[in-house]
Image (tube, grey):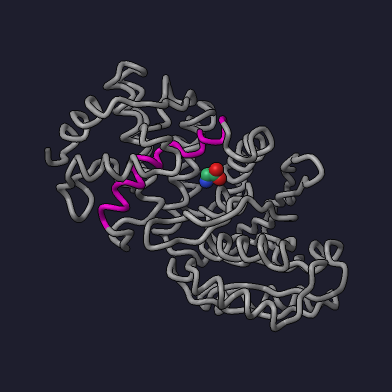
Amino acid sequence: MIEPQTVTVALEGRAYDVIIGRDLIAQAGRMVRPLLKRAVTAVVMDSIVASFHGEALLSALRSEGIIAHPVIVPPGEGAKSFEGLADLSDRLLSLELDRGDRVIAFGGGVVGDLTGFAAAIYKRGIDFVQIPTTLLAQVDSSVGGKTAIDTLRGKNLIGAFHQPCLVLADMGVLDTLPDREMVCGYAEVIKYGLLGDRAFFEGLEARVGGVLGRNTDDLAWAVRRCVEMKARIVAEDEREGGRRALLNLGHTFGHAVEAATGFSEALKHGEAVGLGCAQAFRFSARLGLCSGQEAVRAERAIAAAGLPTALRQIAGHPFHADDLIASMAQDKKAEAGALTFVLARAIGEAFVAKGVDPGPLRAFLIDEGALP
Ligand code: GLY
């Protein structure tokens, strides 16, 4: 049994706590009740989370006298669409929630992003609570207020910054998470060490088995450090004018490969981030920004979690270098088509590189196994 730990996201006037621990869902009623003006809320979750944990959360809320309406959305990325948003908004309206009420997003990144965006625009904005049920959502997407849906032109292109008013990261829910999802979440965990904390990275080298094996101490340590780093970066740069872009380490490379595989189950987002981090370090070494040994060490630590580190490991290989570069130029970080990457001088020392020359990038991708 571990004591819950609290990390505060110190945004002026909108500060909120991220509480990390076990058995938090059982205490959710007590933690959420003070945030509610009246004892009513809606719990948005997909049918899978509902079947594993829905009753536990609803009972915990009801035990504090809260009328908790379950709102079930379909599982999978497809829910993050205009249709999914319209359906969810309509269901919240039918519950007659008003601006003083709060909605609870209970699930992984899809439910968090969709519910957060619905909350951002529902009656011009109501507050929401995040109760993330995947490792990836606990260390990344539930904190920081990025909310969005997808369109046919790409993922997360329509959205809003809308911060939650509380995040409850209950490690107990990770017990039922498939191993592949734990590995995907780990890609975002190691990303934090790679981008800004060498000691954390070295700790992960030693504790990868414990984190993936759901050892409570290892998990609590890792989730807490990631949330601390994210909270600090978001408090400094909420709207990604600068430093927050560091959180996109591995995402420009990874996103291009995800797009080339049609965002299919063949390559999950976390796996793409693992691959992308390895590529970002190899590309940094190639440009002479960091040493080859650092790139090899980063790659080994990513591979130790069972994440892919090379294009040839991905179904659909070989990819075309020009297709990958075209996707990279569409990235939300790209400005006027100029390529932006997060590169590194060493493990724990990432920086944002704007205006990267496509020539060396193309040669690098071909050496990585892409077709000319
Ligand atoms: N996932 C990157 C960010 O929240 O900025």
Determine the main secondary structure of the stretch shown in magenta. Answer: helix
Task: Kindly identify the residue that appears in the image at 56 percent across and 74 percent down.
Answer: 86
| Residue 24 figure quarter | bottom right
- Residue 239 image offset from top left, x and y in percent: 61, 40
Taking the magenta stretch, the answer to whether it contains residue 257 is yes
Task: Kindly identify the residue that appears in the image at 64 percent across and 40 percent down.
Answer: 238
| Residue 267 figure quarter | bottom left
Task: Kindly identify the residue that appears in the image at 44 percent across and 69 percent down.
Answer: 76
Q: Is residue 54 above or below residue 307?
A: below
Q: Is residue 138 above or below residue 273?
A: below
Task: State which region is magenta.
Answer: 242-261
Task: Kindly identify the residue that appears in the image at 66 percent across and 35 percent down.
Answer: 232
In the image: residue 70, left or right of residue 28:
left
- Residue 221 image offset from top left, x and y in percent: 61, 42
In the image: residue 231, left or right of residue 72:
right
- Whether residue 174 is visible to the viewer of this picture, yes or no, is no
Q: Quadrant of the N terminus?
A: bottom right
- Whether residue 82 is visible to the viewer of this picture, yes or no, is yes
- Camera-side residue of 232 and 146: 146
| Residue 338 figure quarter | top left
Q: Quadrant of the C terminus?
A: top left
